[in-house]
Amino acid sequence: MLMDKEAHAAELERTFIAIKPDGVQRGLIAGIISRFERKGYKLVAIKLIVPSKEFAQKHYHDLKERPFFNGLCDFLSSGPVLAMVWEGEGVIKYGRKLIGATDPQKSEPGTIRGDLAVVVGRNIIHGSDGPETAKDEIALWFQPSELVSYTSNAEKWIYGVN
Ligand code: UDP
Ligand code: MG
């Protein structure tokens, strides 16, 4: 059902998406961005950075008890990561759907991990798993001034609002 402008604005949410060092090194940046862009989501922040190991540990703090935590943080801090914030209705949940299951062996064909990755330790992309995580991860990776609020001319065609 179509919504008016205010209702649409209230539904907009933001999620943190990162292309990990394997995705960057494999030349998958443009293809991945294209998946989000063509869907109709709006890019509101982007930067290429090499996170420190301490930073990677903060990003993955929920997993600190897991056996793969140390290797995961070493890997995330091993090279450039493309950090992004994407905005749209339902982008947190649907972004995870586009990305696919954590283990690429279980990701559906057609998803980013399903199409482009083979093993869980090199699954090329990160996406926030819920509203709280999205808020925390955006705040960890970006200064508020790096988030660009704007209306895209395509929005009225994507959402059917005037
Ligand atoms: N990971 C891993 N081995 C595992 C599970 C996870 O190396 O058995 C890595 C994998 O790169 C994954 C990341 O840890 O993307 C974070 O795990 P999480 O369960 O949060 O998966 P995600 O949210 O990325 O799908
Ligand atoms: Mg996760």
Image: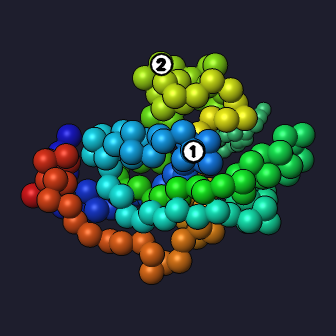
Mark closer to the chain start, 2 or 1? 1
Q: Position of residue 133 (x, y in %)?
A: 61, 56
**The N terminus appears in which quarter of the rendering?**
top left
Residue 113 quadrant: top right
Image point 36% across, 58% down: which residue?
Answer: 43
Outermost residue, left direction? 162
**Eye-nearest disc, 2 or 1:** 1
- Residue contact at pointers 2 and 1, CB within 8 angstroms: no
Would residue 51 be found to the left or right of residue 115 on screen? right
Residue 54: which disc?
none
Front residue of this view, candidates 52 and 135: 52
Residue 63 appears anywhere in the view:
no
Image point 59% across, 55% down: which residue?
Answer: 81
Label 2 sits on what residue type?
Pro
Residue 25: which disc?
1
Whereabouts is ligand 2, in terms of quadrant? Answer: top right
Residue 138 quadrant: bottom right
